[in-house]
Image (cartoon, rainbow, N blue to C red):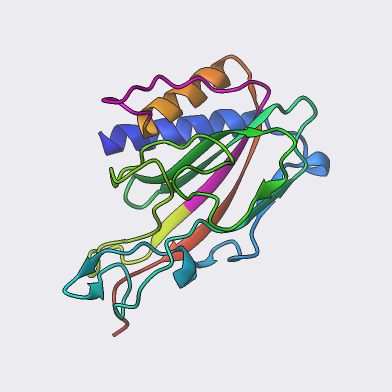
Amino acid sequence: MRILRGGIFLVVAAIAFAQSPDDEHRFTVSSTTFANDTVMPLSTIHNNVVNGVNTCTANGAPGGNQSPELFWKGAPPGTQTFAVVLYDTTAAFTHWGIYNIPGTATGLPENAGVSGSKYGPQILNDFGIGNEYDGPCPPANVAPDTHHYVFTVYALDVSLKLPSSANFPANAETLYHALLRAGREHHILASASITGLYSSTPSK
């Protein structure tokens, strides 16, 4: 299932890239929490406490489990909503999805991914804990040690409609399929990504 999901995510990204504007008016995303292709800070890391130790960090330190600050610019004219996905491309694992962010937004503050976020509806992530952000927690001593966490922002000229119910809440698949449909119908105007790195394997 996750291999298929990884393929869906890449197709969505490819569709969005193909529809991105030229470099002069390029849609970009950045963060004050971490720089592209650098290690994500503890404030963003998940907590999985076993015998008083957080297994998500190399030294057992607690993580903040807060979504990072994100800032984007260059959204194409006609943008009505944004969607943000956090996807671990190493493990084919979705950590976060938030959508129908108003088109007037220029980013999200730190911890916007809290349960019940006011910034937009969220999907049930692959942890299955709740509709919220849950940060990196790569398994220790399982190669490759360092995982790549890609935050992708999609600019759309429509609102996304995801099927959801009490027993079957909107999840990664429903969001990706909604984005695929939007891409096929040329509603994805642009996308931009920023990548964070993280490993919970102790240094040798």
Q: Mainly helix, strand or loop, the magenta region?
A: loop
In the image, is 11 to the left or to the right of 58? right
Residue at 81 percent of width and 40 percent of height: 25
Q: In this view, which residue lies farthest toward the top?
A: 185
The quadrant of the rendering that contains the C terminus is bottom left
Span colored in magenta: 150-170
**So how many labels did they put on this image?**
0
The quadrant of the rendering that contains the N terminus is top left
- Residue 82 in the image: state x and y as whole percent: 63, 34
Is 167 inside the magenta-drawn segment? yes
Residue 200 occupies which quadrant of the picture? bottom left
- Residue 65 in the image: state x and y as whole percent: 42, 61
- Residue 29 in the image: state x and y as whole percent: 66, 50
Residue at 28 percent of width and 43 percent of height: 128
Residue 53 or residue 86, whichever sits in front: 53
Residue at 51 percent of width and 38 percent of height: 98
- Above or below 131: residue 76: above
